[in-house]
Image (cartoon, helix red, strand yellow):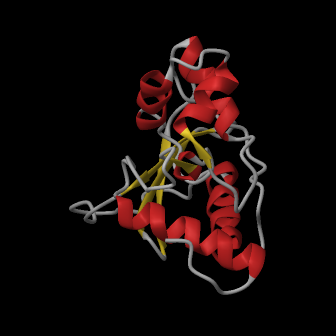
Amino acid sequence: MDNKYTTYYQSPVGLLRISGTPDFISEVHFMNEAPESISAKEEPPPMLIQCVEQLIQYFNGQRRVFELPLNQPGTPFQQQTWNLLTGIPFGKTISYLQLAIKTGDPKATRAVASANGRNNIAIIVPCHRVIGSNRELIGYGGGLWRKKWLLEHETKIMYGVQTLF
């Protein structure tokens, strides 16, 4: 088992905790407050540094697709849902119903919403791009204000300055 490393990045939507191994990223998590102490015992492996660099590029409007090996444990259905999330284009949204249809089961809206909620790799596995069928912002583990910020950020990069919600 590879050692797990953690680093932090102060993003425009708050502090992010980034965890992984030298081979893959396993977590990008929104922190509502800074941990007691962030010690820099050792330099994070290049994989985590690369993840921070790609997140910086994303927030600067220079990156629309992440190119990182990811690994998060989950059921086959969760894995399928997370893989579908990575296929939602930058600046676009789909509904939970549309996502359920993509899994092959239009009745699975609650299941895809649950899988979305269990996604541990925020932004990179873009669960923020899934919205309600009525185009409303619903359900986001990082808080609806972050979901709104991320969607508006992507819309600005894609289309120039305008507001979605």
In the image, residue 3 lies at what x, y percent?
52, 33
Evaluate whether residue 78 shows in this view: yes
Locate residue 108 relative to residue 35 in the image: left or right: right
Of all residues shown, which one is farthest toward the bottom? 161
Q: Taking 100 as reference, is 4 above or below it?
A: below
Residue 79 pos. (x, y %): 60, 22
- At horizontal 73% and vertical 46% (from top left) the residue drawn is 68
**Image quadrant occupied by the N terminus:** top right
Q: As rendered, which of 18 and 134 lies closer to the eye?
A: 134
Residue depicted at x 51% and y 17%: 107
Q: Residue 150 appears at what percent x and percent y? A: 54, 66
Instruction: Depth check: give the residue in front, 149 or 104.
Output: 104
Q: Residue reaching furthest front?
A: 134
Among all residues in the image, which is located at the extreme left? Answer: 36
Picture coordinates of residue 67, whole percent (x, y):
78, 49
* Residue at the image position 56 percent from the left and 32 percent from the top: 97
Left or right relative to 101: residue 20: left
Q: Quadrant of residue 151?
A: bottom right
Q: Quadrant of residue 98?
A: top right
Against 10, residue 65 (above or below) is above
